Amino acid sequence: MGEQSSAFGVQSIAWAPTGLGALALAKAGIQHDDDDDGGEHLKLGAQLDVLPLETLSAVHAHATTLSQLGCRTLGDLRNLPRGGLSRRFGQALLCALDQAYGLRPEHYSWFELPESFSARIELMARVETAPALLFGARRLLLQLGGWLVARQCGVTTFTLRWTFDPLRPRDAGTGGELVIRTASPMRDVDHLTRLLGENLAKLRLAAPVERLELLANEVQPYSPPNHTLVPDTQHDRQSLTLTLERIASRLGESRVLRPVLAEDARPEWAQRWQPASIPLAQRPAATDGMPHPTFLLPKPLQLSMRNDRPIYQGELQLLLGPHRIEGGWWHRVEEGGQTTTRHVSRDYWVALSAHAGVLWVFQTRQATDKPSWFLHGLFA
């Protein structure tokens, strides 16, 4: 099968036993004949003989010289002595002719994609507003989408650059750029277009733009989500991620945050907030083997003591522990003009209260403090 295409889509399509033969028929606008009697190669030869020289690229390069020899069609070319054709035009012409007619096997070389993506486009007219750049940028995004699919990757950071008209004001500079980041590897062209459009809507151009360039800065391996016969929440999670990215592009990255786990054993600092557009790192695995509470108090609550045992709505029964958490000497903060650290040394226990249920408590172990008990979390 062969097809002749343009920047706007497929113009004609044709079938043949050989690739070059199908391409020649497609260029000539000859469609596939459904009433095939089985003699495909015999029929192909008769169809190709009447085609003009321009239908085969290897022949078209010598069309002027061949026309002076009286050749108008591929059939005329085949009637010439092969020895003379080989000496005057080289083996490439005879090889392409034989491959089109099925007299020689066809060999195709693999198309190798570039390791990085970069594409540019000249705008048909000077663009003076940033949102209007989206029309040309989408054409570049379509190319990026094809490159990502072929590379089995998804983009996490890409840059749109523009070049100003040479007749720009002196203080406008030569151009500008816009960097877009996604929370996860993405190759959905529609979503990338919407994300780019949201950011372009907030820009003001210093001069008319004549050229656009798109670069893929960071890409990662991408695995399309598996579709199953039973309902799942994979699509819902993806929709939430895409929605957060669009909101962040409108309000600003610093205004749309989400909680992420941090590699810190201290419960107060085991979670932090980061912009939703930043990709999530791999979740740190818990290695202590201890159960963690469902709810954590904003600030540990110091407990009273009775007979050297902590009290919270009754005397507590220690069930599991101790589990030592120590660290924070590196965490320095300014308080009252002085620098202090957030170093902690605690023994955590799972305790049982007759009225409050299962609790998470700890006893301080720092040498400078008097050992005390604190309530830090509740189990649901």
Image (cartoon, rainbow, N blue to C red):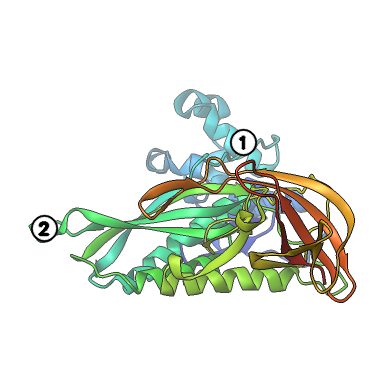
Q: Name the residue type under label 2.
A: Asp
Classify residue 70 as left or right of residue 262. Answer: left
Report x, y in % for residue 68. 38, 41
* Camera-side residue of 69 and 13: 13
Q: Position of residue 27 (x, y in %)?
A: 53, 57
How many marks on residues? 2
Q: Amino acid at mark 1?
A: Ser
Helix, strand or loop at mark 1: loop
**With respect to residue 365, does 175 lie above or below?**
below
Is there any visible trace of residue 208 in the rendered image?
yes
| Residue 6 seen in this snapshot | no
Q: Secondary structure at mark 2?
A: helix
Q: Residue furthest front?
A: 307
Question: Do the residues under discs 1 and 2 have CB atoms within 8 angstroms?
Answer: no
Judge by depth and name the residue closer to the eye, 39 or 164.
164
In front of the other: label 1 or label 2?
Answer: 2
What quarter of the picture does the N terminus occupy?
bottom right
Q: Residue at x 60, y 55 (%)?
A: 269
Q: Which residue is mark 1?
A: 109
**Which disc is residue 64 wearing?**
none
* Mark sitting earlier along the chain (1/2): 1
Residue 256, x across and y down, in percent: 50, 70
Q: Nearer the viewer, residue 65 or 231?
A: 231
Residue 261 appears left or right of 180: right
In the drawing, does residue 185 fall left or right of residue 322? left
Q: Is residue 150 left or right of residue 223?
A: left
Q: Is residue 266 above or below residue 82?
A: below
Give the position of the C terminus as an image quadrant. bottom right
Residue occupying the point 62% across, 57% down: 268
| Image-quadrant location for residue 97 | top right
Q: Residue 171, labelled with which disc? A: 2
Q: Residues within 10 Å of mark 1 (few under 14, many from 20)?
A: few
